[in-house]
Amino acid sequence: MTSASDGLPPLREVIRQHGLVARKSLGQNFLFDLNLTARIARAAGPLTGVTVYEVGPGPGGLTRALLALGAARVIVVERDERAIAALQDISALYPDRLDIIAADALGFDPQTRVRGGPVRIVANLPYNVATALLINWLSIEPWPPWFDSAVLMFQREVAERIVAASGSKIYGRLSVLAQWRCEARILFDVNASAFVPPPNVTSSVIRLVPHPEPMPCDRRLLETVTQAAFGQRRKMLRQSLRSLGADTAALLDTAGLDPTARAEDISIGGFVALARALAAARNPGA
Ligand code: SAM
């Protein structure tokens, strides 16, 4: 563990001062190692002129790294009132560069606080809402979204599902949505022992970079077809897609897909073709 170069107390001391005993209900597993928080912050690339949006700063280890690395502003949203005082101590050291919002990130739109320049999401996400937050960010309309990259810590099992390729047992709806809209890559793993308290699983930091122009299709229809296909992932598509209420054979033919294939065999492009075929079947005149 390194001592802080910003003159602020070590994170263990911050936790003690503010009575920030970790709460499982808030997905609180804190990082105390400032080398590690700096490594995560560096993964977001040069931060000069950049606004960073951080969900769940907690005692502020990652926040401090982002500010020390030169982020023009860091907008943090934190649900735990106990952490707000700790964050205010950081704000005093970096006047006008830390915007602290006490709220639930699931209902907060950071665009209301951005003053211009590129925006990047960097977060050690609370595991209980991590996937929901990611799906919200991947579902932004219109696309490309307001962020130009996202560096996020997930449980490794979730990170592997996000980046999984077709043909893999863990390839699923989340893989299709994430990779349709973003380039997604696992950067490095973080051992459970790096957190206080240590979670039961290894974590991974991933980076998502939005595709400026994903293959064109309606996102909701893409979700409809992946839900049907992966909802019965052991079945052949000619069976699993019946729930769509369209002529399954015609849909698969239009999309150029093998009716005997299973969901996990279908590439992102294949699902896009299927969503487009469904759009045409439901709205033949368009
Ligand atoms: N960033 C800190 C670090 O790396 O040590 C803390 C990360 S901890 C895994 C997750 C943080 O998210 C906690 O501080 C928790 O209070 C906060 N949190 C949990 N649910 C939240 C929500 N819905 N909205 C905003 N923050 C939330």
Image (spheres, grey):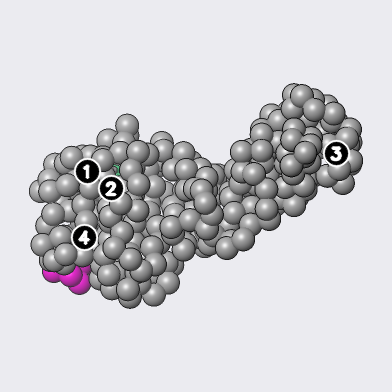
Among numbered discs 3 and 4, the one appearing first in the sequence = 4
Q: Is residue 93 magenta?
A: no
Residue where numbered disc 1 is placed: 102
> Which quarter of the image is occupied by the N terminus?
bottom left
Asked whether residue 230 appears in the rendered view, the answer is no
In this picture, residue 55 sits left or right of residue 184: left
The residue at label 3 has a CB less than 8 Å from ligand 1: no
Ligand 1, image quadrant it occupies: top left
Proximity of marks 4 and 1: CB atoms separated by less than 8 Å? no
Cα distance between the residues tagged 3 and 4: 51 Å
Among numbered discs 2 and 3, the one appearing first in the sequence = 2
Nearer-the-camera pick, 3 or 24: 24
The amino acid type, in three-letter code, at marker 3 is: Leu
Q: Element type at marker 1?
A: strand
Q: Which mark is residue 98?
A: 4
> Which quarter of the image is occupied by the C terminus?
top right
Q: Give the label, 3 or 4, closer to the camera.
A: 3
Instruction: Work out whether 155 lies above or below 284.
Output: below
Q: Which residues are magenta?
A: 2-7
Instruction: Give x and y (percent) for residue 148.
Output: 46, 63
Residue occupying image coordinates x 77% and y 38%:
285
Nearer-the-camera pick, 37 or 147: 147
Residue occupying image coordinates x 33% and y 66%:
116
Residue where numbered disc 3 is placed: 252
Residue occupying image coordinates x 75% and y 33%:
282
Instruction: Give x and y (percent) for residue 45.
Output: 42, 72
Among numbered discs 2 and 1, the one appearing first in the sequence = 2
